[in-house]
């Protein structure tokens, strides 16, 4: 089978056409094929959309002591099982610019033109192309598409598309991400077959961690208790992690989506353990903002990225190039320590008869050309809902007021 490989800097992407995908981003190896997985493994099993605080506790069980501390106690939110929102001390601290730069580099590499094989990879059609490791790799096993999307036939936008998920996992100390293709064959596997064929035979699992509410196998007939019983027959320990709660309700991806849809990015951030972010490339829009004194960067995000409710947000912007940043010509800024405050509008721009949803970011106290630049925007607060104004002048006055609200909010953060 034809293999295509690209290697840039410390990040390597390799893809086997048709059925095999390899990606190495930061320190995480990603594969959708059992034949290319690195084994043996310690496995955290689940969907993990959002990589929120509850997910991180499941992953902490398979990490060594140092990485486990990274995944839990290093988070701004208390990790007690019934933490209160009032325990947050510095949740609004800026993201690491160096970390965001790594995300941008990985996205740029992924979108680059593929080159011919270098001979550094194992052919996918060999008898066993798995890479053997001296010690079990901390491995997240998840599914693509999401099982709910597969069974409903309805597209399910993600809190963390693949690049963002890998970015988050890398910072926690996860070494490998296995994205199992969720198809009819996988859906028909009994719980025992899933454990024995996929986790044990395919991934040589040495340890498994799941949330207490995890369900798997045909008809969701398998439970965390059942997983433990099956694995015990093979002397494989299973850690069942209690559900993590926040103000009496369990932390879940659905709850984060609800917070984002009701204009509460602050609550979403508290459940995630970090601000919710949008990452995309700046593309040309209608350039109306600059004609009224508020130029904006039109952000194109992945089509499967979950968007919050329409309206105006106070944000922080990462990836804005310095004047002497040569890498910006390739659409990637080194980032350095530069973090720009801004105001973002998500909506249809009813005042100017907009016909489609757009994401526009106005950078405060900054001017320059951002076309084709990769930016990451963190949502820091909700300013107001989208509305239609009677005139352009009224819109200008409101935008100026929005900027004032955002400046005050970001200064107090």
Image: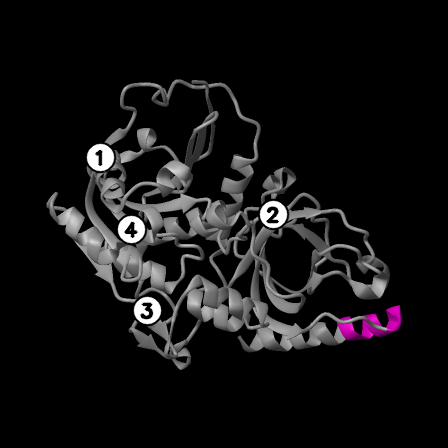
List x then y, in percent, for residue 206: 18, 44
* Contact between labelled residues 2 and 4, with CB atoms less than 8 Å apart: no
Q: Which residues are magenta?
A: 390-399
x 31%, y 41%: residue: 189
| Of callouts 2 and 3, the N-terminal one | 3
Q: Residues within 10 Å of mark 4 (few under 14, many from 20)?
A: many
Q: Residues within 10 Å of mark 1 (few under 14, many from 20)?
A: few
Q: Is residue 193 left or right of residue 392?
A: left
- Up/down of 199 relative to 352, above or below: above
Q: CA distance from mark 4 to mark 3?
A: 16 Å
Magenta region, mostly helix, strand or loop?
helix
Q: Is residue 217 magenta?
A: no
Numbered label attached to residue 244:
3
Separation of disc 4 and disc 2 at Cα?
Answer: 27 Å
Q: Nearer the viewer, mark 1 or mark 3?
A: 1
Q: Which mark is residue 303?
A: 2
Question: In terms of sequence position, does the residue under pointer 4 or pointer 2 come before the other?
Answer: 4
């Amino acid at each position: 089978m034809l293999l295509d490989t690209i290697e840039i800097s410390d990040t390597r992407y390799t893809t086997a056409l048709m059925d095999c995908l390899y990606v190495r981003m930061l320190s995480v190896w990603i594969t959708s094929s059992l034949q290319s997985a690195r084994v043996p493994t310690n496995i955290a099993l689940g969907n993990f959309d959002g990589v929120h605080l509850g997910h991180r506790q499941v992953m902490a069980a398979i990490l060594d002591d140092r990485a486990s501390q990274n995944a839990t106690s290093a988070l701004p939110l208390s990790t007690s099982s019934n933490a209160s929102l009032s325990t947050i001390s510095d949740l609004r601290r800026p993201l690491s610019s160096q970390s965001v730069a790594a995300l941008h580099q990985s996205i740029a590499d992924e979108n680059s033109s593929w080159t011919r094989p270098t001979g550094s990879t194992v052919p996918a059609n060999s008898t066993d192309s798995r890479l053997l490791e001296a010690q079990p790799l901390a491995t997240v096993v998840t599914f693509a598409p999401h099982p709910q999307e597969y069974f409903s036939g309805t597209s399910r936008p993600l809190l963390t598309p693949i690049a963002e998920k890998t970015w988050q996992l890398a910072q926690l100390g996860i070494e490998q991400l296995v994205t199992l293709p969720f198809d009819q064959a996988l859906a028909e596997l009994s719980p025992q077959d899933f454990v024995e064929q996929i986790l044990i035979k395919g991934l040589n699992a040495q340890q498994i961690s799941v949330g207490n509410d995890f369900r798997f196998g045909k008809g969701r007939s398998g439970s965390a208790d059942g997983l433990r019983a099956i694995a015990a027959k093979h002397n494989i320990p299973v850690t069942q992690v209690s559900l993590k709660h926040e103000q009496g309700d369990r932390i879940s991806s659905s709850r984060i989506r609800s917070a984002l849809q009701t204009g509460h990015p602050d609550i979403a951030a508290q459940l995630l353990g970090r601000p919710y972010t949008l990452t995309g490339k700046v593309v040309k829009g209608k350039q109306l903002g600059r004609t009224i004194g508020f130029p904006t960067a039109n952000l194109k995000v992945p089509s499967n990225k979950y968007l919050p409710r329409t309206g105006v947000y106070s944000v922080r912007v990462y990836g804005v190039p310095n004047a002497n940043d040569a890498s910006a010509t390739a659409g990637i800024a080194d980032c350095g320590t530069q973090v720009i405050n801004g105001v973002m509008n998500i909506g249809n721009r009813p005042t100017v008869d907009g016909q489609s949803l757009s994401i526009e970011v106005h950078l405060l106290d900054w001017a320059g050309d951002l076309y084709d630049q990769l930016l990451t925007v963190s949502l820091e607060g909700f300013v107001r809902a989208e509305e239609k104004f009677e005139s352009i002048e009224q819109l200008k006055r409101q935008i100026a007021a929005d900027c004032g609200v955002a400046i005050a909010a970001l200064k107090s953060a």
